[in-house]
Image (cartoon, rainbow, N blue to C red):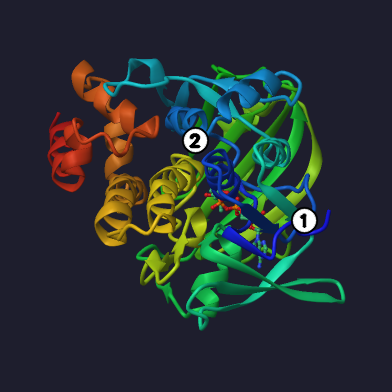
Amino acid sequence: MPFQHDAYDVIIIGAGPAGATAAAMLAQAGKSVVVIERSFFPRFSIGESLLPQCMTYLAEAGLLDAVTAHADKLGFQFKDGAAFYRNGEHTLFDFQNKSSAGPGTTYQVKREHFDQLLAERAAAYGAEVHYGYTVTAVDFNAAEYVQVTIDKADEHQTIKGRFLLDASGFGRVLPRLLELEYPSDFPVRQAAFCHLKTTLSGGQFDRNKILITVHPTAPELWFWLIPFADGTASLGVVGGTEYFADVDTPEQALWQRVHEEPYLLEVLGDYQVIRPAQLITGYSANVSTLYGDRFALLGNAGEFLDPVFSSGVTIALKSSSLAVPLVLQQLNGAKVDWEQDYTLPLRKGISTFRSFVKGWYDTRFQDVIFYQQQQPEVKTMICSILAGYAWDTDNPYVRESERRLRVLVELCQES
Ligand code: FAD
């Protein structure tokens, strides 16, 4: 498809969840939007377990109906909670028992199908989505337009837009080109994962929940098991680099550790690997700023914390939900306070997740999760955060996450 305009209102880099959602919203607001996507869809991506809070942002962007309508056909697995297991202890969080208002269920999705669906819906709303083009340079020198260089094989061209949204995820286009990279406060960790065909019949397994199990002797090493509705599942292990130092292949990284977790093996039952293991290192990332003159960073192009608690897509969608109204205001000539109206609110939720992620790896939050005498009211508040409601400041564990978590940990550890 040829490019339809000489100059667009908005150029978006990347057609992942952040980019597609922003594109859908902007197109519905009547803006000319072009999305430049490096890959050809469908393409694999990790990040398969959604949180119920996502559904709010998908609905806001006019994308939820398509997701629910295609769920069965695309093998999206209904999800209503999270199950945790550590050395004989089980804990279940049913997301419908959360303190925050909003959806209590969601899906686990194969991202190649989910991302393609969102991008196609954005295109149906009028966004132009161009696949196979890589953004290689940006130029903010002209007063009127941002100029973006895009490459496809030998083709080399520039396009213009009044505003640039970077939703390039781990591609991190603007952080690299504009030198915005900032070290994450998390240590370098690795994740090894694959897809399996499996009946998942063993243990106390509830396929409507993501299963997170903790390594029997190294509690900072954990596993995910994410079932899909088509009889396949995603299996992964996450931990510090020291746990994978003696392995030569992604397969070894995954299976050596999985074979040390008997409960997980029991749940897996008979299985067949259908997508070979992959190993990713050092995915946590941050930036010095989430916005600048005529640009903003969405989703993982900004900050990424950690896979535990499956917060990535939720944060990506939240970023689009916050940024798009501001882009519209700016395009209409209004002055926008990006710090006040974008960075601060977005980072509020990210910092909530950060407190709980830190507490997971230093195992304090694991003690809370596996504490069996939890007060029901407290459990509903923790459940809200696990369901993605990390921006609900009515929840004291959002308002003062560090302090509240500290007090709760003391309580659980004393009893
Ligand atoms: P992406 O989904 O990464 O999309 C970015 C798009 O930009 C890609 O399609 C890419 O091809 C394109 N692109 C990149 N560079 C360029 C370029 N130069 N030009 C043009 N296009 C470009 N999140 C969850 O919610 N649930 C989970 O269970 C979960 N598990 C995870 C497990 C692991 C091991 C990791 C590392 C992450 C996990 N995440 C999870 C996080 C999740 O993967 C991301 O947060 C999410 O995909 C971010 O969406 P995004 O739209 O910002 O970026």
Q: Is residue 402 above or below residue 292?
A: above
Horizontally, residue 112 falls left or right of residue 404, namely right
- Report if the beta carbon of the residue with label 2 is closer than 8 angstroms to ligand 1: no
Quick one: which residue is furthest to the bottom in this view? 141
Q: Which residue: 71% across, 18% down? A: 72
Q: Which residue is mark 1?
A: 131
Horizontally, residue 392 falls left or right of residue 330, namely left
User: Of the residues under marks 2 and 1, which one precedes in the sequence?
Assistant: 1
Say what secondary structure mark 1 lies in: strand
Quick one: which residue is furthest to the right in this view? 154
Q: Is residue 297 above or below residue 123?
A: below
From this viewpoint, is residue 311 visible? yes
From this viewpoint, is residue 282 visible? no
Horizontally, residue 318 falls left or right of residue 250, namely left
User: Please, what is the three-letter code of the amino acid marked with disc 2?
Assistant: Thr
Q: Which residue is mark 2?
A: 213
- For the residue carrying disc 1, how many other residues have a C-alpha within 10 Å: few (<14), some (14-19), or many (20+)? some
Q: Which residue: 45% across, 30% down? A: 85
Q: Position of residue 334 (x, y in %)?
A: 33, 57
- For the residue carrying disc 2, how many other residues have a C-alpha within 10 Å: few (<14), some (14-19), or many (20+)? many
User: Please, what is the three-letter code of the amino acid marked with disc 1?
Assistant: Tyr
Q: Which residue: 33% across, 38% down? A: 366
Disc 2 to disc 1: CB gap under 8 Å: no
